Amino acid sequence: MTDPGADRYEVVVVRHGTRVTRRSEVFLNHAQYGEPDGPFTVDYHLWVVRNATTTVLVDTGFARGPAEARGRTVLVDPADAYRRLGVDTDGRHPLVVTHAHYDHIGNVGLFPRSTVVVSSAEMDFWHSPVAGRRLIAHFTEADEVAVLSRAEEEGRVRRFSGSTEVAPGVVVTEVGGHTPGQCMVTVPTSAGVVLLTSDAVHFTEELERDMPFVSVTDLPATYEALQTVRDMVATGAVDVVLTGHDAGVLDRLEPYSPELAGVAGVVGRLRT
Ligand SMILES: [Zn+2]
């Protein structure tokens, strides 16, 4: 197991939504695999990384309106989840935006004092004319992207390229592929280094069978991101991989609390 060092965190995974779809709807060019279609469950997650002194928010999940308009089932409103987890939304906790799709930035407005950490490539892309094209815009809400724009006008956006440390030991790394500035986050915990892939890897099957997700900006970069994750695991750089949309992630984790069973799980729980 990788030595996580002095600064350790717990990672709370909030499963705020779900939907049942078809394999052909989630795997790019599914027909090329020559496999039968079938049902496939997609869960929606956001993450809270914290210890006694520091909280880092990783994405904010979707807002109810855009989620329900797309046929997603809301399991818990993220605002309610933050409240039940005791997250102070008025605090200045860094907020990592792994990418700007609606199911990741739907509640950025809940954190009016946070510094928003997002890659330059991601910010630039969603403010470029092509972002309005139908098959791209499908994954965003204009008013939610506008929240990022306003945060930047307020001087609260911290852009970066490559990688950046947002709290001691918590590192955000840009991989692209799914979106131009798609990022992953590594977190040292008592269970080893946790990799939050966000949508660099939606599903374990995507990773294990090298089957990219249906929505890609850059297919070669998508394949390279999958390989990056495999390499991180193989070299022991990470110990626990948490994907963006796997169903059943919570089944493998310690429940955060009885009240939030099925909705929130924790890795590396810190008992204070
Ligand atoms: Zn997503």
Image (tube, rainbow, N blue to C red):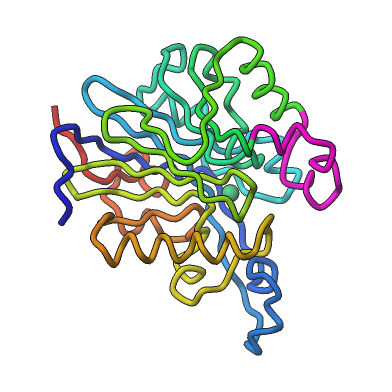
| Horizontal and vertical percent position of residue 168 | 27, 29
Q: Eyeballing the image, is 229 above or below 190?
A: below
| Horizontal and vertical percent position of residue 160 | 51, 31
| Horizontal and vertical percent position of residue 11 | 31, 40
Q: Nearer the viewer, residue 41 or 186?
A: 186
Horizontal relation, residue 10 to residue 91: left or right: left
| Residue numbers of the magenta segment | 123-142
| Horizontal and vertical percent position of residue 231 | 35, 64
Horizontal relation, residue 195 to residue 4: left or right: right
Q: How many marks?
A: 0
Q: Identify which residue is drawn at 66% across, 12% down.
A: 153
Horizontal relation, residue 201 to residue 164: left or right: right
Q: Nearer the viewer, residue 71 or 235?
A: 235
Task: Name the main secondary structure of what is drawn in magenta.
Answer: helix
Q: Identify which residue is drawn at 67% across, 64% down.
A: 214
Can you tell which quarter of the image residue 28 is in?
A: bottom right
- Queried whether the magenta region covers residue 194, the answer comes back as no
Q: Identify which residue is drawn at 53% across, 34% down.
A: 97
Q: Quadrant of the N terminus?
A: bottom left
Horizontal relation, residue 131 to residue 208: left or right: right
